[in-house]
Amino acid sequence: TDDVARDPSSSSSSNSNSTPDFPSIDDERARGKTIALAAFATGVFAFGVSTTSGVGSGDAIAGANLSQLEKRSTSLDAALSSGKPTVLEFYADWCEVCKESAPTVYAVETAHANGVNFVMLNIDNTKWGGELDAYGVDGIPHLEFLDKDGVSEGFIVGKFPKEVLEANVAALERGE
């Protein structure tokens, strides 16, 4: 006799009809659907958080979307009739550089709120077609610097450091 304990399921008998224990196709499909549903729910949640962040003060602005910033910006008509210099920011919601620069623009806007108007114009809104042509907007973000009489003093397009924006807005505010 053999003194070794044997596992009955590992019998090497030629009569064994055992097959490996694979999950069924239905089990795999159910698992895949569960994973897909969880990924979808996570994506919806992340999108919801990114698009509904409120506009607040300080660092809270980093979570705000561009449409929210546009809603709180000065209207174009009010800015041009105020007798103060104005910065026109041409942007689009889909523009990654526009999104990245939003906190910088907001910080400079906040620092110069008493002396300079900031107006945001979404290039996807057809009502701004005349302004796009008038200021030669061919790339975004496009920031146009207008003196107190609404005359263009210059512009910047694309990515820019905060120091450049700050220097331009400060000069505009001083009337330079």
Image (tube, rainbow, N blue to C red):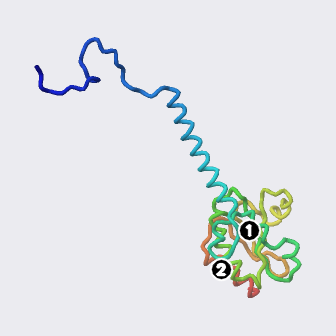
Decide which of tag 2 and tag 1 comes sooner along the chain: 1
19 displayed left or right of 139: left
Horizontal relation, residue 116 to residue 49: left or right = right
Which residue has dot 1 on it? 69
Residue 23, relative to residue 88: is it above or below? above
Amino acid type of the residue that numbered disc 2 sits on in the rendered structure: Glu
**Residue 84 vertical placement versus 121 (above, below):** below
Amino acid type shown at disc 1? Leu
Quarter holding the N terminus is top left
Quarter of the image where one finds residue 103? bottom right
**On screen, residue 30 above or below 113:** above
The residue furthest bottom is: 174
Q: Residues within 10 Å of mark 2 (few under 14, many from 20)?
A: some
At horizontal 76% and vertical 86% (from top left) the residue drawn is 175
Instruction: Work out whether residue 136 or residue 129 is closer to the camera in this orientation and state it.
Output: 129
Which residue is pictured at 50% across the width and 31% down the height?
Answer: 28
* Quadrant housing residue 162: bottom right
Secondary structure under the numbered disc 1 in the rendered image:
helix
Q: Position of residue 44 (x, y in %)?
A: 64, 50
Image spot of residue 5 (x, y percent): 18, 27
Residue extending farthest top: 15
Tell me the residue that label 2 is attached to: 166
Q: Quadrant of residue 145?
A: bottom right
The CA distance from mark 2 to mark 1 is 19 Å
Residue 147 position, x and y percent, is 80, 80
Viewer-closest of 42 and 105? 42
Rendered location of residue 37, percent (x, y):
59, 42
Categorize mark 1 by other alpha carbons within 10 Å: few (<14), some (14-19), many (20+).
some
- Disc number lying in front (2 or 1): 1
Label placed on residue 122: none
Instruction: Report helix, strand or loop for mark 2.
Output: helix
